[in-house]
Image (cartoon, rainbow, N blue to C red):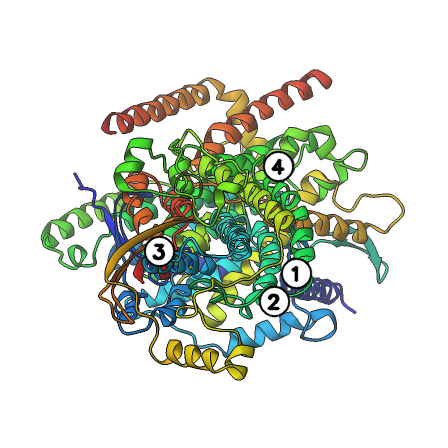
Amino acid sequence: MPEWLVTTILILVKLGFVFFLLLTGAAYMVLAERKLLGRMQLRYGPNRVGPFGLLQPLADAVKLVTKEDFIPSQADKFLFFIAPGIAAVTALLTFAVVPFGPPIRLFGREVPLVICDLNIGVLYFLGLSSLAVYGVTLGGWASNSKYALLGSIRALSQLISYELSMGLAIVPVVLMARSFSLTNIVNAQAGLPFAILNPPAFLIFLVSVLAESKRIPFDLPEAENEIVAGFHTEYSGMRFGLFFVGEYINVIILSSMVTVLFLGGWHGPLLPGIVWFFLKVGFISFLFIWTRGTLPRLRYDQLMHFGWKILVPLALVNVIVTGAILLLLNPAKG
Amino acid sequence: MQVLFFYLVALVTVISGVIVVAAKSPVNSALALVNTFFCLAVFYVMLSAPFMAAIQIMVYAGAIMVLILFVIMLLNMGVEPFKKFTHVTWGVVAGSLVLMLTLFFISRGQPTKVVGAITRDVILKEGHTELIGKSLFVNFLLPFEITSILLLVAIIGAVILAKKEV
Amino acid sequence: MAKTETMTINMGPQHPSTHGVLQLVLELDGEIVRKITPHIGFLHRGVEKLAEHRTYHQVLPLTDRLDYLAPMHNNLGYVLAVEKLLGIDEQIPERANAVRVMMAELTRIKSHLVWLATHALDIGAMTVFLYCFRERERIMDFYEKISGARMTSNYFRVGGLSRDLPDGIEREIRAFIDEMPGHVDTYEGLLSGNKIWQKRVMGIGVIGAKDAIDIGLTGPALRASGVDWDLRRDQSYCDYDKYDFQVITGKDGDTWTRYKCRLDEIRESCKIVRQVLDGLKPGPILADCPKVCLPPKKDVVNTIEGLIHHFKIITEGFKPEPGEVYVGVENPKGEVGYYLISDGSPHPYRMKIRPASFVNLQALPQMAEGAMIADVIAIIGTLDVVLGEIDR
């Protein structure tokens, strides 16, 4: 087999694997959330479709596809169409740089378990997450509904604000790993994960990630008790489904980013690397669900206050302190 | 292959650039501008400058345009004021002047020649991000710091201006 | 320079957290609410008018449907008013009064549980909702065992009760009452210590004692503003003065204080129910007023007097002397009063209901203007309005 063919096939296989994993992962994330929330709230959660409700995601998908795809008459049709797509696609694309396992040997060659090991992987992730704002914002604006507009304004300001602290929390990681590449960052944590080496950055990142995922206690953009459903108030059928799936893919992506940046990615004793990776992602996702079962929602001004007056200064100080310590440990080379 | 790709992206860039000017709704203009930025980022990648590409997307597409969009959304601008082009003649005059200027520069300049120490080979060898870092924080540290102080002053000024109104 | 405009937005009648069909027209300046105009009447059924064409006994089921979260309290206010109109309020048997108090306090717990559940849900704490409904379900079961219905109980009668307590219910209620304070601690554990919860409710929707009295607030909303006023103690009915309980008051008049007051009221209600159970003695459950109270079924089929009374009361109803009367009771939400005018016929000439929620809702604009959208939701929750009662 020619060299390029093997490479192409390998890339396609990896793509297919990740794509399949993400979509089913998102679907079962919904189920897991409903099950776990149910258990936390003295209920059973879905248990009618299939054994233990395992076919529930399938039933949900069938329902969403067969529902009427309603477009408000005053909506901006083009933007209304593409907004859910932007939300889902930006979420999906991010996984391209996430290394989910150590390189394996296949057909006598080294195959890294990442679709594309960009040397600016961290920036790629930040860039895509800043583009993800568009899906939410445009969706809300194009619906031409007041609740949706309120939701999209909230989403926009929230995402921009917390992106900042998220980016600043990553800076110490990049400083410590001396690389933007996610694979190198994981390798740099072979000894101790960065969550232990730099707990403030880890906590700031975790909180910002919660806010980025638009979930309780930061679910203001869709706070159903205040603004009905926020930016996707007017969406129905599969378009709503795209927003919904996008949100859960986002949860998985953000959990894997936490894993890669702070929890040492695939590193761990005894079990194979890929298992460790998914275990860690699962744990962080569980954390997301757990907070949803526990916390009330913040108010808009409190959210902004928290983001700008607490998280961002903390993150800045952390960057400086980390930089200073690193400089002390290994004095500049030139 | 690469050239073909370049022309494809360039075509998209030019088309979205035209849409920025021609679109009736300001939101569509803004989105076309985002698309243009995105295409520019692709060019950066093709020039083996992925760092610049990422920064382009994060700063321009991800932050600045979002804020502009925010303002447009809140101002609730209708389509109407953008339908009428009342100053067509002036527009044509200004446009042709700019065109002449551009042609003049192109005819006199040497657009294909690379000047300076940083060539493609150097970038590939040293790493593009490292080069930017070096020139920003070693060679041009003082201007960099002055710029940041200038920006800080601007931020404080903006905050004070906004505060007064309340 | 662009000028800023406010955005007018319709909150309700179809909205997840306007607690029914309340419509609020909000004028928004960004997230800040400048003006609130409540629109009510989407659930209007004309209860007061309907009452004019029914006998006094037939009005009772209508009152269940006012504040459907506390049906027994509505029943209680109505039967007390009719009893006063008839002048038989001194003849109510002791057991009937005791059971009335017990059911009224269980209802208070039930109503407060729904309030806490929805209030927390509105602020985003979903789990509390289901925890509260677990305990509410127990009270619903008591309702079903005692009155036969889970919501529209229709249990009290003019002169007493419709039937005696079923066997063994005292033990179940006692078990529940023993557990309940622990459950309240659980809710507090889920909410009170939570920084986000504190930030969302402290200092929100403040109303001072004077304003509260001026508007006519009653119930926990009034007491949280520091006014020590509780009809159970200050205009005792149903032998409430026999029981030892505390009237919970607060100082600050904000959402947090109202939250604390209501939780403490649940604990106090548990105390009252326990005292009732301790002192519950067997005895008659209906006043000895054959012209007013339906005779027991045994008498209807066995004695001629019973049959005649039954027939007369069912077909014609009883005829109070002409006159008018007002009785207010301390509903979970505030004072619910019944004003009845009799012209000597078997139907009320006029029945006016003073609903607690209707008056309490009037405080909403004053409490919420200048706050944020999220605060409006919290304040609707803390006022604990029920639209069935507001629209009547």
Q: Residues within 10 Å of mark 4 (few under 14, many from 20)?
A: some
Q: Position of residue C308 (x, y in %)?
A: 42, 81
Q: Is residue C26 left or right of residue A122?
A: left
Residue underneath mark 2: C145
Asked which secondary structure carries label 1, the reply is: helix
Q: Please state the horizontal and vertical placement of residue C364, each as a whole percent of the image.
A: 31, 45
Q: Amino acid at mark 3?
A: Lys
Tag 2–tag 1 contact (CB < 8 Å):
yes
The image quadrant where one finds the N terminus of chain C is top left
- Between circles 1 and 4, the one closer to the viewer is 1
Q: Residue at x 59, y 42 (%)?
A: C271
Structural distance between the alpha carbons of marks 4 and 2 = 80 Å
Identity, as a three-letter code, of the amino acid under mark 4: Gly
Q: Secondary structure at mark 4?
A: loop
Nearer to me, A306 or A198: A306
- Have a look at marks 3 and 1 and say if they share a chain: yes
Numbered tag placed on residue C169 in the rendering: 1
Tell me the crowding category of disc 3: few under 14, some 14 to 19, or many 20 or more residues within 10 angstroms, Cα based: some
**Picture disc at residue C84:** 3
